[in-house]
Image (cartoon, helix red, strand yellow):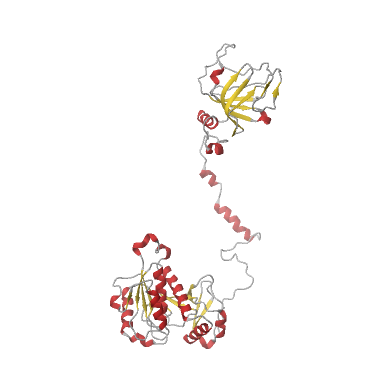
């Protein structure tokens, strides 16, 4: 019966002109040799019409994709009508509702109609599971994934992809050997990562020179090989005085030194691995040992910036009648960031801290080392066992009172006694022409940084 095929999902191929339609059968008219589909798809895209009707004359091939009703098996009697079919017959003049421009006149047609029974398929590797997927995608509710990715997939892959076998086809050693051999054949040269730079002229590694009588004697070099000579304290003092005359005041220099030295200290403390919002219960502790002079003011400036970055700072500064004005200004600013300030070594932490910053020494007053506050602070630092960063250490023949792991020089390194301390250099913003005024031929060795390590040449 024709009603046996209702709700079945079929695919109708109408040739290259009209394309392929899919949908569920809503009616079959044997008399007029027409079949109607509801909720149709045209070439994989849902039609705007709720139902379309096809004439047998336009149908090239018809496939049953899935049955919704039980269909009886065909009888051995050739005249049995158990299996419905569209039999070509004489048609009345009619108009196709989907393609109204096609008007069929009353003619005889013998176009073959193929109806596939359950169990038959001309789709490679098709299974009933994949047929059910097609039914849902075509006749039932669809999703965006079905519309975008539903077509053209083979749901019956017999074997998994052999990843190991495919990977074995690529011999990494052989390929890289061929690439390396190109250089010897003159087709291609190979370079290290630091050689792929076009050099317009030879590199001059000695780009800083100082007057011979003002040379400190010791030379350093940067990571890139640039030579940085040390200078005497007298030349260094003249350099800073000339910069101050041009507008690089003590306050501006203190701020620069504070920023650079605190950035170095933050790196030594662990940087982002230590200073993170998730680690609020283990904030680093830094003790700043400062004297009542310019070098001490540099340490106070460093401490203010560290406190602003959530570092617990303890400032040691003795009570002295002769305290330079720059120190008082820096202490006032520091007090707005941290209230931890002591004047006696007895009030310093008795447990090990993370870092000690030493700014006790004064370049022009070595007698400060004989003061009790100085000696007690230096003794505490050596006994605390915390690593020490010394900023702008004093020069002289007397060994350093506090053993420093790192030493930070300003502008150019001073000629100090040989120690095991690792030397760093800070850019304090002195213009190039200021160097020239004091007889120094200068080309900045800092590159993209403001603090760089120096190595003994």
- Disc count in the image? 0
Res 372 visible: yes
Kindly indicate the quadrant of the structure image that contains residue 42.
top right
Kindly indicate the quadrant of the structure image that contains residue 264.
bottom left
Work out whether 129 lies above or below 404.
above
The residue nearer to you, when weighing 73 against 300, is: 300
Left or right position of 41 against 252: right
User: Which residue is depicted at the point 64% across and 70% down?
Assistant: 200
Left or right position of 333 against 247: left
Work out whether 83 lies above or below 215.
above
User: Which residue is depicted at the point 54% across and 24% down?
Assistant: 8
Quarter of the image with the N terminus is top right
User: Which residue is depicted at the point 56% across and 39% down?
Assistant: 148
Kindly indicate the quadrant of the structure image that contains residue 62.
top right
Q: Position of residue 114 (x, y in %)?
A: 61, 22
Res 404 visible: no
Left or right position of 400 against 84: left
Work out whether 145 lies above or below 446.
above
Q: Position of residue 283 (x, y in %)?
A: 36, 65
Q: Position of residue 183 (x, y in %)?
A: 62, 60
Q: Position of residue 278 (x, y in %)?
A: 38, 59
């Amino acid at each position: 019966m024709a009603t046996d095929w209702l709700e079945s999902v079929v695919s109708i191929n109408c040739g290259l002109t009209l394309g392929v339609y899919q949908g569920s059968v809503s009616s079959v008219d044997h008399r007029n040799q027409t079949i109607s589909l509801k909720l149709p798809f045209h070439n994989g895209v849902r039609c705007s019409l709720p139902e379309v009707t096809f004439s047998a004359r336009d149908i090239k091939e018809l496939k049953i994709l899935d049955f919704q009703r039980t269909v009886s098996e065909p009888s051995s009697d050739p005249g049995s009508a158990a299996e419905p079919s569209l039999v070509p017959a004489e048609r009345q003049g009619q108009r196709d509702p989907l393609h109204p421009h096609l008007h069929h006149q009353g003619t005889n047609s013998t176009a073959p109609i193929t109806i596939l029974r359950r169990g038959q398929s001309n789709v490679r590797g098709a299974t009933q599971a994949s047929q059910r997927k097609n039914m849902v995608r075509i006749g039932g509710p669809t999703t965006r994934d079905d519309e975008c990715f539903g077509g053209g997939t083979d749901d019956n892959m017999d074997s998994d992809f052999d990843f190991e076998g495919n990977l074995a086809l690529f011999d990494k050693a052989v390929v890289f050997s061929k690439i390396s051999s190109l250089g010897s054949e003159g087709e291609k040269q190979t370079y290290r990562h630091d050689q792929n730079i076009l050099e317009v002229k030879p590199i001059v590694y000695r780009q800083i020179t100082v007057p011979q009588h003002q040379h400190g004697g010791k030379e350093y070099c940067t990571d890139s090989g640039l030579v940085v000579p040390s200078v005497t304290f007298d030349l260094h003092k003249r350099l800073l005085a000339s910069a101050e005359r041009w507008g690089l005041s003590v306050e501006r220099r203190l701020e620069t030194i504070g920023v650079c030295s605190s950035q170095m200290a933050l790196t030594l403390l662990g940087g982002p691995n230590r200073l993170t919002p998730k680690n609020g219960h283990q904030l680093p502790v830094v003790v700043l040992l400062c004297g009542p002079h310019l070098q001490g003011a540099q340490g106070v400036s460093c401490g203010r910036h560290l406190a602003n970055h959530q570092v617990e700072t303890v400032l040691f500064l003795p009570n002295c009648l002769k305290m330079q004005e720059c120190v008082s200004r820096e202490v006032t600013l520091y007090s707005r960031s941290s209230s931890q300030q002591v004047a006696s070594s007895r009030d310093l932490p008795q447990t090990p801290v993370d870092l000690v910053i030493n700014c006790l020494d004064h370049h022009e007053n070595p007698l400060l080392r004989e003061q009790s506050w100085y000696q007690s602070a230096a003794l505490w630092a050596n006994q605390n066992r915390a690593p020490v960063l010394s900023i702008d250490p004093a020069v002289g023949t007397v060994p350093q009172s506090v053993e420093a792991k790192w030493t930070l020089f300003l502008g150019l390194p001073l000629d100090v006694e040989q120690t095991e301390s690792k030397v760093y250099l800070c850019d304090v913003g002195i213009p190039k022409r200021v160097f020239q005024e004091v007889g120094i031929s200068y080309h900045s060795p800092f590159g993209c940084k403001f603090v760089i390590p120096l190595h003994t040449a």
